[in-house]
Image (tube, rainbow, N blue to C red):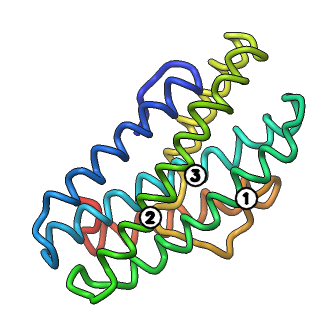
Amino acid sequence: MGHGGDVIAELTADHREVEDLFAEIEKAPPGSGERKRLTDRLTIELVRHSVAEEEYLYPAVREHLPGGGPLADRELADHSRVEKLLKQLEQRAADAEDFDQLVARLKTEVTAHVRDEEENLFVKLRQDWSDDRLMELGDKIRSAKKTAPTHPHPSAPRTPPLNKLLAPGTGLVDRVRDYVTGRGK
């Protein structure tokens, strides 16, 4: 993840990447190591995407978009549900009895969240914000994804300033852990 362009282009490209990963997971044989590997990749991408939105997009929405507070709260609630599902999946082997059910629930949650962002939030941002603001936010999102955690941390703070302070350190620990275990390769 790190596609370029304004915040809407960046996040929309992430959404398409996640959709592609869901499609690959569905094609992989049930219970296979390939299905687990793809789910780990999906988790990494979703966590990095979510953390970046929580650090920069939703605070900006709350502050600079009319009616942004409730909108940001709804998006954060979506992220919380997704992160809990990701944590459950992380703790399961691909041949676990409920693995495929959890993936299906995750896909439902993520698809609804993506649809809402693209059909509502992104439309409002395009209407209300300048191209410069959208581009600046895209740069911040890309930067945040580089240092974001790669594992779900459902109890981590979701709002500034604590999330901005803790995420890079947590991200570093996660990336070292991934390197040692080969996760995400």
Residue under label 3: 50
Q: In what quadrant of the picture does the N terminus appear?
A: top left
Secondary element under disc 3, as helix, strand or loop, is: helix
Of the two numbered discs 2 and 3 in the rendering, the one whose residue sits closer to the viewer? 2
Against 154, residue 95 (above or below) is below
Q: Residue furthest bottom?
A: 97
Against 145, residue 25 (above or below) is below
Place residue 27 in its image quadrant: bottom left
Of the two numbered discs 3 and 1 in the rendering, the one whose residue sits closer to the viewer? 3
Q: Is 37 placed left or right of 168 in the picture?
A: left
The disc label shown at residue 106, or none: 2
Residue type for callout 2: Leu
Residue type for callout 1: Asn
Against 150, residue 88 (above or below) is below
Task: Work out how far the residue at label 2 is from the one at label 3, CA to CA, in angstroms.
Answer: 14 Å
The disc label shown at residue 163, or none: 1
Q: In what quadrant of the picture does the C terminus appear?
A: bottom left
Place residue 162 in its image quadrant: bottom right
Task: Work out how far the residue at label 3 is from the one at label 1, CA to CA, in angstroms.
Answer: 11 Å
Determine contact: label 2, label 3, CB under 8 Å.
no
Kindly identify the residue that appears in the image at 71 percent across and 40 percent down: 56
Residue type for callout 3: Ser
Q: Residues within 10 Å of mark 1 (few under 14, many from 20)?
A: some
Kindly identify the residue that appears in the image at 63 percent across and 27 percent down: 122
Tell me residue 91's x, y (percent): 39, 84
